[in-house]
Image (cartoon, rainbow, N blue to C red):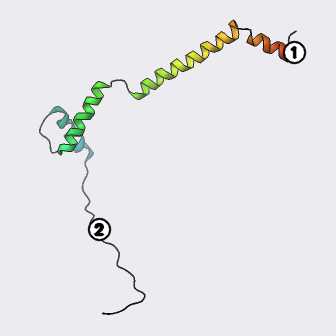
Amino acid sequence: MKFVMFRTSKPKQYNYKPRYYDPAKEALERKKAILGLETKLSEQEELRNRMSARWRQKNPVEFGEKYKRMSFIVYGSIILFGIYVIFFTELIDNMIRAFGIIK
C-alpha cells in the first residue's frame, strides 16, 4: 500500500441526461388527458390534471376577484365612517375649538 500525504480527490461523477422538452406537445397531451383521450402522460400527471380541472370548476372566482371585492368593501366602510364622523358628530367642532381657530 502506497502512502500519499497530499492527494487531491477525483471530482464527483454524476449522470446528466438532457431531455428534449416541447411545450406545445406537453400542452396537447394535457388537453387530451382532460378530455379523457388516450395520452402518454403518467398516472400522476393525469391525476394532477383532473384535480386541477375540478378545482377550477368548483372555484370560478379567482383570488384577485375576491381581493378586489374585499378591498372595495373595506375602503367604502372607511369613507362612510369618515363622512359620519365629519358631518354627524361634534368631534370636528371640538377639535376646532381646542386649537382656537374659531371661538
Q: Which residue is located at x 27 percent, y 34 percent? A: 52
Relative horizontal placement of residue 18, taking residue 35 as reference (left or right) = right
Name the disc covering residue 14, or none: 2
* Amino acid marked by disc 1: Gly
- Image coords of residue 24 (percent x, y): 25, 43
Badges 1 and 2: C-beta atoms under 8 Å apart? no
Q: Which residue is located at x 36 percent, y 24 percent? A: 61
Give neighbour class at mark 2: few <14, some 14-19, many 20+ (Cα, 10 Å): few
Q: Quadrant of the N terminus?
A: bottom left
Looking at the image, residue 63 lies above or below residue 13: above
Q: CA distance from mark 1 to mark 2?
A: 81 Å
Q: Quadrant of residue 79?
A: top right
Foreground pick, 26 / 24: 26
Relative horizontal placement of residue 95, taking residue 80 as reference (left or right) = right
Counting the numbered discs, the total is: 2
- Image coords of residue 53 (percent x, y): 25, 31
Looking at the image, residue 98 lies above or below residue 15: above
Of marks 1 and 2, which one's residue comes earlier in the chain? Answer: 2
Q: Quadrant of residue 58?
A: top left
Q: Which residue is located at x 43 percent, y 24 percent? A: 66
Looking at the image, residue 36 lies above or below residue 96: below
Q: Which residue is located at x 29 percent, y 30 percent? A: 55
Name the disc covering residue 100, or none: 1
* Amino acid marked by disc 2: Tyr
Name the disc covering residue 2, or none: none
- Image coords of residue 50 (percent x, y): 22, 34
In the displayed orientation, state which residue is furthest to the left. Answer: 38
Secondary structure at numbered mark 2: loop
In the displayed orientation, state which residue is furthest to the bottom. Answer: 2
Give neighbour class at mark 1: few <14, some 14-19, many 20+ (Cα, 10 Å): few
**Which of label 1 and label 2 is nearer to you?**
1
Q: Quadrant of the C terminus?
A: top right
